[in-house]
Amino acid sequence: MKLGVLQFFSWPGRHGPLEEVYDRALERIEIMDKTGFDAVWLAEHHFTTFSVCPSVHMLGVMAAARTKRLRIGTAVSLAALYHPLRLAEEVALLDMLSGGRVNWGAGRGFAHSEFNAFGVPPEESAERFREAVEIVLQAWTQERFTYQGAHFKFDDIEVLPKPLQRPHPPTWMAATSESAIDWAASRGFSILMDPHASMKDIGIKRRLYADKLAEAGFSDKGRDIPMARLIALAPTKSKAEEIARRGAQWLVDSYAGPQHTARKSMQAPRTYDGKEPVQYYLDSVILHGTPEALVDQVARLKEEIGLNYLMCAPLSRDTFRLLVDKVLPKLL
């Protein structure tokens, strides 16, 4: 079992100086490095206080400078929004400067507001994402290369630096929809599983991924498949539920609630299993309880859906402290 942390950079209500958001996150990352976490996974978002980190690669350089062994993950580089050669350069440079500690997670993105602001037609985003991934991997593994695609064309170009890790950093694709899982599996990519799906849906998607991999002639044996889960911990069940409910309310208000559907999304509208959105997250998404209860929940998920890499998104500072002190030693 591996444990990582999905690090958001939330600025709720714009309370306090924004620089404190980054200072607290970097302090947390230093703690991760000194304990047993495998990686910090940095979340890229644009134009929202839900997570004010528009460049996971710049933040990754800071994280690398403050740590020695912790792997630096991107969850994710929104590849459809980048020029792919620039993306290849930035991630390779981060890998070089970190001493070969990059875990590269790439995703398409889903918010129309981001695509429109960056001049990417939403209807082209999937094709641009897939071309970008292909170009990045060729740029890393070939001395010089030529590429002819629908959106990008290069002739006999050399991208420098190459990543320190060879042939390239470990790579994952964010895959939420069935079509994204199918594409990733068909190419043999490992996947990152999202923090908004219910426990039931995570299990269904995990089995679908294994089946699609097998159909394409690949195996899921030995693969790390990070499953992102929101976490709320406290000494008592009732206190943990209070933290979980507060975190769910923040999530729904700032990012994932039905009121945000006006910002058109590439994803299908969420149904919340027919529940009120906050209750859906509380009942079906957030792992919450005492540290002992969380250890038991993780053991069940390991048995039932093959969980082998828990990417934790702590919903409070107290949760993070309990995760480090009480949960980490029992799961590693």
Image (spheres, helix red, strand yellow):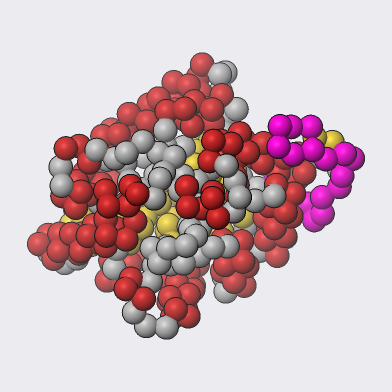
Q: Is residue 205 magenta?
A: no
Left or right side of 271 for 24: right
Instruction: Looking at the picture, tell me which residue is in the foreground, 208 or 320.
Output: 208
The verdict on residue 158 being magenta is yes
**Can residue 301 be seen at all in this image of the molecule?**
no
Q: Main secondary structure of the magenta part?
A: loop
Q: Is residue 329 left or right of residue 47?
A: left
Identify the residue at horizontal 24%, vertical 38% (top origin). Answer: 271
Q: Which residue is pictured at 30% across the width and 34% down the height? A: 201
Tell me what residue is drawn at x 15 percent, y 47 percent. 276
In this rendering, is residue 172 above or below 149?
below
Q: Is residue 23 left or right of residue 98?
A: left
- Counting labels gives 0
Question: In this orientation, which residue lies closer to the viewer: 44 or 228?
Answer: 44
In screen coordinates, is 283 left or right of 183?
Answer: left
Please, is residue 293 above or below residue 35 in the view?
A: above
Measured as percent of width and height from the top left, residue 131 is found at 67, 36
Q: Residue at x 54, y 27 (%)?
A: 183
Q: Nearer the viewer, residue 207 or 31?
A: 207
Image quadrant where residue 7 sits? bottom left
Q: In the image, which residues are magenta?
A: 148-168
- Residue 259 image offset from top left, x and y in percent: 27, 52
Residue 152's image quarter? top right
Residue 101 position, x and y percent, is 62, 57
